[in-house]
Structure formats: C-alpha cells, structure tokens
Amino acid sequence: MLAEAMRDTTSNLPIRFRDVGFAASATRILTGVTLSFEPGGLTVLIGPNGSGKTTLLKLAMGLITPTSGRITFGFRSAPGSRRRAFVFQKPVMLRRSVAGNVAYSLRMAGYAPEPARIEMLLRQVGLAALADRPARRLSGGEQQRLALARGLARDPEIIFLDEPTASLDPFSTKGVEEIITQIAAAGVKVVMTTHDLGQARRLADNVLFLARGRLCEDTPAARFFAAPDTPEAERFLAGELVI
C-alpha cells in the first residue's frame, strides 16, 4: 500500500496534449501529438528508436515545454502540484545511504523525512534490509528499485518510467515489473516506455505507438497486439524496420 501523506488537492490529471510538437534546433522530434493521460491504468509507449518516446514523457512531466501546440495539466496550462514523478533509465544515486536517498526525496517533495515513512517506502520496493547501505553500492536492479522508492516519496498521482528495466537481468526485471504492477494497482497512473514487447504485453492496459515523431496508435493493449490499426505498427510487431 502506498504511504499516506497530506495531499495537494490540485490534481495534474488529466494531462492533455493538443497538436503538440517539439523540435531541438533544426531537428523535429515530435509532430502533431494529441492524447490524454487519464487517472488510473498503465500506459506503455513503444516504437522504434528515435520516435520521440522519451521526449513525450519529459513533456508530460513538465521537464521541457512544447515548441508548438498545447499541454494542459488538470485543465490548467501549468502543473498544479508536485505529485508527478519521473524515473530515468539510468537513475543517479546520491552519495548517501539508501535511506538517505529516500529522505532527500521526501524533503524535496515537501514531506518530513520521518523514519517510519522512509521504512514504509523501502519496504514497498523490497529494500528495507538495505536501508543503511551506500546507494552507489547497490546492484543495477536494486538501484532501479530505489529510484522507484524516491519517485513514490512524492506521493505521485502519475509516475513516468523511461525504460525502467532496459539494462537488468530477467530476475531483476521480474522484481521491478512486480513493483510497477503494484503501483498501478494502488491507483497511481503509470506511463512507461519499453523496447521489450513481451513486457508491454504483460503490463500494458493501453499502448501508445510512435513512429517518425508521430502518434500512430492509442489503443487498448489487447487490441493493439491482436490487430494493430496501422501498417507501421504491423511492421514493428513483425520485427521489421520502421523508418
């Protein structure tokens, strides 16, 4: 169960994109993206390398701003609270203990770093026994679990995960997937990218498929994998190059 805390009553959801584009210098990364992240469920973004998946996550988190179009957060033009979290593919561990990393995240989110709350968050990701270990000594899978605990310290209503198991072995991947499933089951909206189609099949409630910087499909996962609507998605699922 997610740790309880005083909640900001101003919700960020739904997060809505309206004809959103993003360009870096002369390179256009996203074009004409329209979608909505509603409360609840687990959304998986898939698509070829360079299709704009990570950029879309960063836009939805508010880390970058669109160069065209509009994004609203709970019907406002700017995020209304801190209750959003982002976990990077290769999270940076602070030079302190596992518990110290979580305490820092709690303070940054405006919460008191109470020992009981820290222990609850670490227990949630299976790291309670490692609370005093230096975070940089953890294995890759353990560091990703700690990154999830730091994200949960924000008491998020939506959490963005960028390739959370990309460099992990099967055992560590299974453990992280179980935590992600538990987070979604607790009512937190989960939005994640992956190149692992098996993982997408296991976890996704709905799929966003991007290609060439455009959103080609936004559909329930079962339908997407059984009968994709676009030829780009058909080729991608068949293991063919989509350019």
Image (cartoon, grey):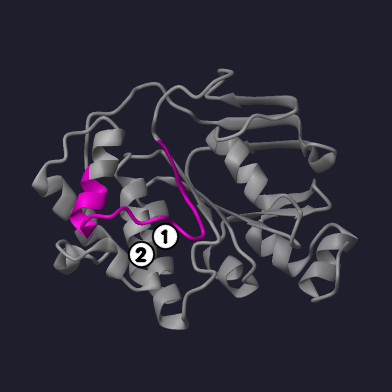
The amino acid sitting under disc 1 is: Ile
Sooner in the amino-acid sequence: mark 1 or mark 2? 2
Q: What residue type is labelled 2?
A: Gln
Marks 1 and 2, Cα distance to the nearest angstrom?
15 Å
Q: Does the magenta stretch include residue 30?
A: no
| Residue 178 locus on image (x, y percent) | 38, 67
Q: In this view, does 121 lie above or below 19?
A: below
Question: Where 17 sits versus 101, above or below?
Answer: above
Place of residue 130 in the rendered image (x, y in percent of width and height, measured from the top left): 18, 67
Residue sitting nearer the eye, 194 or 218: 194
> Residue drawn 25% across and 43% down?
104
Q: Residue at x 20, y 51 (%)?
A: 100
Q: What residue does disc 2 label?
A: 143
- Pair 1/2: label in front: 2
Residue at the spot x=58%, y=37% of the render?
60
Residue count near mark 2 (Cα–Cα under 10 Å), binned few <14, some 14–19, many ≥20:
many
Q: In this rendering, would 142 be left or right of 68?
A: left
Residue 17 falls in which quadrant of the image? top right
Q: Does the magenta stretch include residue 86?
A: yes
User: Where is residue 200 shown, x and y percent of the image?
Assistant: 60, 66
* Helix, strand or loop for disc 2: helix
The span shown in magenta is: 84-103
- At a point 86% along the width and 61% down the height, the residue shown is 232
Q: Is residue 8 visible?
A: yes
Residue 1, can we see it? no
Q: Name the residue under label 1.
A: 180
Quarter of the image where one finds residue 34: top right
In-front residue for pair 206/168: 168
